[in-house]
Image (cartoon, grey):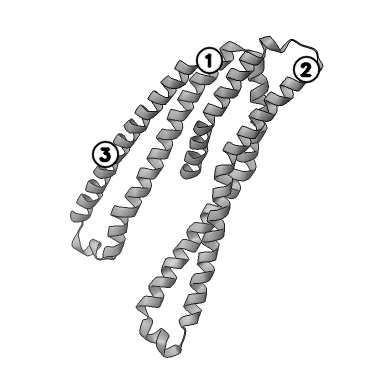
Amino acid sequence: LIFLFLAKSILSIFLRWLIANFCYKQYAKLQLKLLSNYQKMDYEDFLFRSTGQYIRNVRELCSDCLSYLEACLRFLSEVVIMLVIVAFLLSLDFKVMTFLFLAITPVFLIYELILKPINFNLGKLKDKATIGTYRNIDTSLRSLKEIRILSKENFFLNKLNYFNNIVFNSQRKSVLITDSPRYVFEFVVIAFALLLLLFLTEKNIDLKQYIPVLGIYIFAALRLLPSVSVMTSSLSRIT
């Protein structure tokens, strides 16, 4: 098991480097291609948009594509590594692994069916509020003279505070939903192990033959928690 997780650590580091290397190369290529296409545009078509929009596309949209691509590849790499470890654990004791899987599945379903849609809606709400924040700042600075004449400074300040509160509350809830699965999985694994030990004790079953296997499963499950965390965070970034 130690050699298995040593191999997992080495493979994870290598895959992380490989993914970062691939993604940033694609990021650079995308920026070059996008800027090249803008330079080849008909000048009249070019004038339909502001320079700021082109700069935003080259800088921010390319960055969003990089983030999405990186999240997809990291999720796939963690899935492959996890499947290899789960297959190894199944070969040790199929029954224990089956019970552990049944204990974890409800937590996963709750996250996917209930918490994930909530997180998605929070992300949409945050994006709308962020757009409102930038528009409010842009309007208040572009129309500074008129705002001072009409004494409307507080109107824009209150509006900015309103949007900021939405962003703050949405982000706070989103972080809670994204980070919670790891700790819930940890609790489920420990609770499962303790309940299994209590069950074996009540049945007067010799624990000597079960404790080593159970210890391996607990250790393996706790070591897999970072992978679960990476997978959930990557799914959140993808969706």
| Disc 1 crowd, CA 10 A, few/some/many (<14, 14-19, 20+) | few
Q: Which residue is denoted by mark 2 in the rendering?
A: 201
Q: Residue 88: which numbered mark, if any? A: 1
Residue 22 x %, y %: 30, 35
Residue type at mark 2?
Answer: Thr
* Nearer to us: label 2 or label 1: 2
| Disc 3 crowd, CA 10 A, few/some/many (<14, 14-19, 20+) | few
Q: Which residue is denoted by mark 3 in the rendering?
A: 25
Residue type at mark 3?
Answer: Lys
Q: Who comes first in sequence, dot 3 or dot 1?
A: 3
Residue 115 x %, y %: 62, 44
User: Residue placed farthest to the bottom in the image?
Assistant: 149
* Nearer to us: label 2 or label 3: 2
Q: Residue at x 56, y 16 (%)?
A: 89
User: Do the numbered discs 2 and 3 sit on residues whose CB atoms are within 8 Å?
Assistant: no
* Nearer to us: label 3 or label 1: 1
Camera-side residue of 26 and 208: 208
Q: Who comes first in sequence, dot 2 or dot 3?
A: 3
Residue 188 x %, y %: 66, 31
Q: Residue at x 60, y 38 (%)?
A: 183
Residue type at mark 1?
Answer: Phe
Camera-side residue of 96 and 33: 96
- SS label for mark 3: helix
User: Residue placed farthest to the front in the image?
Assistant: 208
User: Do the numbered discs 2 and 1 sit on residues whose CB atoms are within 8 Å?
Assistant: no
Alpha carbon distance from label 3 to label 1: 35 Å
Alpha carbon distance from label 2 to label 3: 57 Å
Q: Residue at x 38, y 24 (%)?
A: 10
